[in-house]
Image (tube, coloured by chain):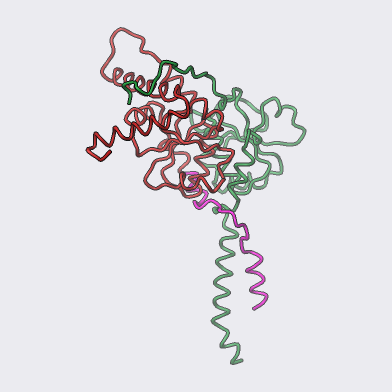
Chain colours: A green, B red
């Protein structure tokens, strides 16, 4: 009994550590993934799916339109729901995302919005997450730089 | 006691990689703000003024960067973004990091990852290099009367265009000399030593 009394501080310490670990483990607002996974998955648009690929997809999918207000748009896709990006992490929307067994495809007219939402959800551990690629690949450089062959270091610019 | 220890060990995060430091809702709220974007005209002004409080980060691959880039940029290809060697450039408290790619997608990935990791002062050049080219490199004033505001805008674009063309026309070996000469000139104007 006396021995147990001596150990009470050790037990207390262990309980505090356990509580802290459990709080961290079950806190859905904290990220626990390796950011390198997001970089790897997004390389060379491996996380993107085109509208044509979507049409021929054999598996079930859920398209999420991230547009809000005036930006809610345009492409009408079967099985699409609207979750404005501002509300992406609301409890109800988190439940939809977490409980979906289907592939989740994010869509917005603004590729920046889709990209940011994809990274956040990827880092929250959501699997089977894709981006609906825009019709035109915005990551391709459309112009060709024409060097000025007359430029010399002696010019007045320096 | 052993059971207690076992439970703790079972839940301890053994992932040694650095995960995002920001909370999810905090990162989301930052990411929906319009304040994270700079227009190409704003970036053109930083380039023209050689503003040293900004660090332009080109996230395209090395080949594209070599073909042309915005003067003063450093190249951190997105495909290599998680390499720890870049942290020294990404996590600089005194500088504002402006990410750009050809469009907005790669730059937005880079912005979200670096902001999530807790690095401050991150921005995106809206529209990327395609927008830069369309607005800064190719646009011309069309009209008869130019207002002072339009005049300032086009002068800014013209200066940035001139610097972009000059720098990107130089062979790689001379680009370094160009920047060294610029820094020397700036230190002379500031009254510093050569």
Side (left or right) of B166 relative to B61? left
Report the residue at 56% width, 61% height from top: A24
Camera-side residue: A2 or B75?
Answer: B75
- Residue pushed farthest top? B144
Image quadrant holding the N terminus of chain A, namely bottom right
Side (left or right) of B136 relative to A59? left
Q: Is B27 inside the magenta-drawn segment?
A: yes
- Residue pushed farthest right? A58
Q: Is residue B162 above or below residue B58?
A: above
Q: Looking at the rendering, which quadrant does residue B122 occupy?
A: top left
Report the residue at 54% width, 81% height from top: A9
Q: Is B52 inside the magenta-drawn segment?
A: no
Q: Is residue B26 above or below residue A118?
A: below
Q: Looking at the rendering, which quadrant does residue B7 occupy?
A: bottom right
Q: Position of residue B59 (x, y in %)?
A: 52, 35
Q: Position of residue B149 (x, y in %)?
A: 28, 20
Camera-side residue: A117 or A157?
Answer: A157
- Residue pushed farthest bottom? A2
Side (left or right) of A50 relative to B64? right
Q: Is residue A140 above or below residue A66?
A: above
Image quadrant holding the C terminus of chain A, namely top left
- Residue pushed farthest left? B191
Q: Position of residue A27 (x, y in %)?
A: 57, 57
Camera-side residue: A94 or A34?
Answer: A34
Q: Position of residue A111 (x, y in %)?
A: 54, 31
Task: Report the number of numbered marks.
Answer: 0
Report the residue at 56% width, 83% height from top: A8
Q: Is residue B183 above or below residue A11?
A: above
The span shown in magenta is B1-29
């Amino acid at each position: 009994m006396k021995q147990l009394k001596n150990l009470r501080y050790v037990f207390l310490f262990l309980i505090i550590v356990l509580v802290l670990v459990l709080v961290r483990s079950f806190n859905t607002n904290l990220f626990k993934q390796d950011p390198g996974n997001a970089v790897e998955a997004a390389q060379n648009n491996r996380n993107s799916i085109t509208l044509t690929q979507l049409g021929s997809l054999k598996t079930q999918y859920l398209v999420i339109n991230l547009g809000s207000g005036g930006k809610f748009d345009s492409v009408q896709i079967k099985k699409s729901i609207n979750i404005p990006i501002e509300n992406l992490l609301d409890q109800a929307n988190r439940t939809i995302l977490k409980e979906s067994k289907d592939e989740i495809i994010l869509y917005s007219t603004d590729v920046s919005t889709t990209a940011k939402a994809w990274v956040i959800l990827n880092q929250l551990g959501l699997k089977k997450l894709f981006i609906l690629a825009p019709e035109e690949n915005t990551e391709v450089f459309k112009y060709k730089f024409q060097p000025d062959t007359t430029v010399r270091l002696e010019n007045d610019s320096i | 006691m052993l059971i207690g220890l076992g439970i703790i060990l079972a839940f301890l995060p053994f992932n040694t990689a650095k995960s995002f430091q920001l909370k999810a809702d905090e990162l989301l709220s930052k990411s929906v703000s319009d304040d994270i974007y700079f227009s190409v005209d704003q970036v053109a002004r930083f380039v023209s003024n050689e503003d040293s409080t900004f660090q332009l980060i080109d996230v395209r691959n090395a080949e594209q960067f070599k073909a042309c880039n915005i003067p003063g940029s450093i190249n951190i290809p997105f495909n290599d973004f998680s390499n720890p060697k870049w942290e020294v450039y990404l996590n600089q408290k005194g500088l504002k990091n402006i990410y750009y790619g050809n469009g907005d997608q790669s730059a937005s990935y880079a912005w979200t990852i670096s902001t999530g990791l807790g690095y401050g002062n991150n921005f995106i050049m809206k529209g990327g290099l395609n927008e830069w080219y369309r607005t800064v490199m190719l646009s011309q004033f069309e009209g008869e009367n130019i207002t002072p505001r339009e005049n300032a805008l086009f002068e800014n674009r013209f200066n940035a265009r001139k610097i972009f063309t000059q720098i990107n026309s130089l062979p790689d070996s001379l680009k370094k000399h160009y920047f060294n000469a610029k820094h020397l000139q700036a230190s002379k104007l500031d009254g510093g030593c050569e």
